[in-house]
Image (cartoon, helix red, strand yellow):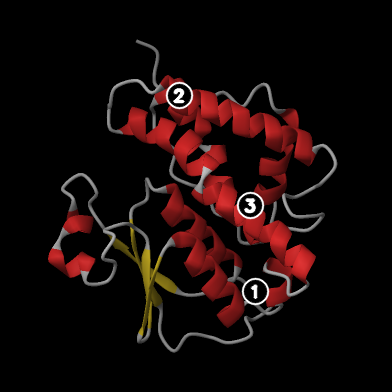
Amino acid sequence: MNSGTLPAAFPAQAIKLYGAAISGHCHRVVLFLSMLDLPFEMVDIDLVTKEHKTPGFLAMNPFGQVPVIADGDTVLADSNAILVYLAGRYAPEPDNWLPRDPLAAARVQRWLSVAAGQLAFGPSLARVTELFKRPANPEAVNRSHALFAVMEQHLASSAFLAGNTPTLADIANYSYVARAPEGRVSLEPYPQLRAWLARIEALPGFVPMLQSPVGLLAPAA
């Protein structure tokens, strides 16, 4: 446990997180759990052997996707939904992460939608293509650069995605942006985006995502 501010509530037992270290969707939950200083137990799900498609896992999430958390009797799937739950249930100041003000909340929701849309079908898909040695997907790379161009322009006038303080918008988008080079998407053309990554990495409780030697990070032949 870190020695920061205690959460508004505290789980009676460690939260179980069913996921995989290579998943950016799982990392965003790990990252937020760490920032909230909450105890959790990682239960590794083998994606290669399709453990996430077994009857036991499908009983927790019929969509067969990681992550899933079990917080006592509460079982919840979908990484963005989990972030919303953790902020409301355990954050000392939940409004900082997901504001109640309608406009501020809408700004966060906009980027949660990006995380489930452009990010998932751009950098995330490009990275999956490399990780699992699938046929090249230049369209996913093109979508990644289109997204990053928008984010670069936006971050030129905003320290974080939904304003000048970190919110769930940043937690939801960080992981796949940070690991975009694994999908052959360079971050070099985007100084504002790289500065944003550095600001998140400087936050208390930050933990990095597993780095995989694929894409632009693959060892030279």
Pair 2/1: label in front: 2
Q: Amino acid at mark 2?
A: Glu
For marks 2 and 1 on the same chain, the one whose residue lies earlier in the sequence: 1
* Label pair 2/1, CB-CB below 8 angstroms: no
Q: Which numbered disc covers residue 3? A: 1
Mark 1, secondary structure of its residue: loop
**At 53% from the left edge and 41% from the top edge, which residue is drawn?**
119
As measured in the structure, the alpha-carbon distance from the residue carrying label 2 to the one carrying label 3 is: 21 Å
Foreground residue among 25 and 140: 140
Residue 143: where, in percent of width, then height?
A: 53, 29
Q: Amino acid at mark 3?
A: Trp
**At 78% from the left edge and 58% from the top edge, which residue is drawn?**
165
In the rendered view, tell whether residue 29 sits above or below residue 5: above
Residue 133: where, in percent of width, then height?
A: 27, 27
* Quadrant of the drawing holding the N terminus: bottom right
As measured in the structure, the alpha-carbon distance from the residue carrying label 1 to the one carrying label 3 is: 30 Å
Residue 127: where, in percent of width, then height?
A: 41, 33
Mark 2, secondary structure of its residue: helix
Residue 151 found in image quarter? top right
For marks 2 and 3 on the same chain, the one whose residue lies earlier in the sequence: 3
* Label pair 2/3, CB-CB below 8 angstroms: no
- Residue carrying label 2: 139
In the rendered view, tell whether residue 10 sits above or below residue 109: below
Q: Is residue 97 left or right of residue 46?
A: right
**At 51% from the left edge and 56% from the top edge, which residue is drawn?**
28
Foreground residue among 15 and 53: 53
- Residue carrying label 3: 111
